[in-house]
Image (tube, rainbow, N blue to C red):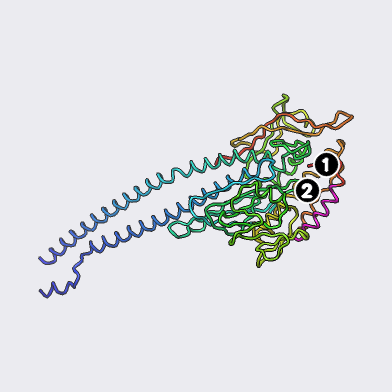
Amino acid sequence: MKTINKRGFLDISFSWIFAFLIGAMILVGAFYGINKFSSLRESQDSAELGFALKNLLTPLESGVETTKSITITLPVLSRITHECATYGNFGEETFSVQQKVKNKWTNSGVPISFSDKYIFSPEVFEGQKFNIFSKPFYFPFKVANLIYFSNSKDVYCFVGFSKSAKAELKNLNQNNFEFDSCSENSIKVCIGTINCDIKVNTNENSVEKNGEKKVYFEGDALMYAAIFSDRATYECEVKRLMKRSSELSDIYKEKSLNLLNLGCSPFNGLRNSFSSVESSSDLAFTAQDIKQVENTLGCDLW
Amino acid sequence: MVNKGVNNRGNKKGQVKVQQMAFMILGLTLFFVLVGLFALSFVFSGIKDSKNLLDEQQATLLVQKLANSPEFTCGTAFGTEKTNCVDLDKVWALKNKIKDYSQFWDIDGIEILKIYPDSTGECTRGNFLNCETLTVMDSGSGVGKSTFVSLCRKESDGNKVFNKCEIGELIVRFSNE
């Protein structure tokens, strides 16, 4: 009797302890595997969505239309992080998509990068349905088609815009654009009015948003760019556009030299002028250089 | 002595049981791992297909986009703006700067093929007006996607300058890795 009592309160043999240990290890391994698998699946979804988004934007860049628009509806509420960098010959931008699944945001999405697109949106924006339109940017030759993103739930009300600008925006058929009579919660974009969320000054070619420093534009394409993006994104994309303009300017310079005997005057290029643009406030100086150069061309170079 | 013998026998019996259990657990673990691997391969078999599909879509869209991109398009140099019109004078200048564009479009090669009128040979500075293929970006290999384009350039007959447009094909090559 005494010997039995000495064996202790729990009479568990070594084989049971061994089995529990191994069983626990298997369970922990299984949970770890499931966790890894689901995060891998999230990454796959994010990468597929990002890549599909990239493909959907491509048709906006081809063709000779003055403006083009599409609406993209994502499967679930998504958060798109848009980063812009200016390194190299053209800079780069990166999109990553996070999705809201069961009231929780998935881990940070797989980044999809591209150098040949110029997208104007806030750095981080959320939504399920996005209205997107594009417009070519000429400076003085065509540089790129600029792409503008807006959440379909954010209503933009344009006040004081010219007839032609309003007609252009109306033709996009975007249901989140209003003109002159604004609904209560709309984002008011105004020319020459004081109490507005986004103030456009067409005399000094500037756009000012609540709480942000002014940015400057040349032409309607960049004006819309300033309206639909935040300051950091806008300035970065302007620098990227100037980099591409520099490359195109070199191409036109060589083309003009090749066509000297066909009536063209030598075009010295505008690389220096484009490269000197440090921020959007320098665009006006480049615009002046362009005006001077345009008058000296002997042929239709672009 | 008798007690010792009973203990030894008990230990051996215990050792055999532990061994049995260890084999059993090993077998079970292996089974689950195999089932897991099978499930994973089933679930992820679609990834490659979907990547290929997206790549294919991208290639088709990109070749259209490229034909109308500022580096290739005629713009208003040959009258009003046209779609799928390639300015050969500009492309020749681009060819000399193509290193700058090596990472820009995410493609491996660009070729321009003259379809009509018939001509042969690779285009060089000397035979620019009478050749078949202009390799803008050399790829060596890769899957090609193409679109038909007008190939336009400025020419002169000695008295006046005129626009000359011919039928061609813009071919874009991608690696299929």
Q: Which residue is farthest right?
A: B159
Residue extent of the magenta highlight: A279-294
Residue A256: assigned label: 1
Going from the N terminus, do you reach mark 1 or mark 2 first? 2
Outermost residue toward the front? Answer: A181
Tell me the distance, in whole angstroms, between the alpha carbons under discs 1 and 2. Answer: 15 Å
Label 2 chain ID: A
Say which residue label 2 marks. A140
The answer to whether residue A286 is magenta is yes
Q: In front of the other: label 1 or label 2? A: 2
Q: Residues within 10 Å of mark 2 (few under 14, many from 20)?
A: some
- As drawn, A130 above or below B120: below
Quadrant position of residue B8: bottom left
- On whether residue B23 falls in the magenta region, the answer is no
Tell me the quarter of the image containing the C terminus of chain A: top right
**The N terminus of chain A lies in quadrant:** bottom left
**Front residue of B171 and A64:** A64
Q: Amino acid at mark 1?
A: Ser
Would you say residue B1 is visible in this rendering?
A: no
A30 vs A277, nearest the viewer: A277
Left or right: residue A106 versus residue B160 is left
Q: Secondary structure at mark 1?
A: helix
Residue type at tag 2: Pro
Residue A286 in the image, given as x and y percentages of width and height: 80, 55
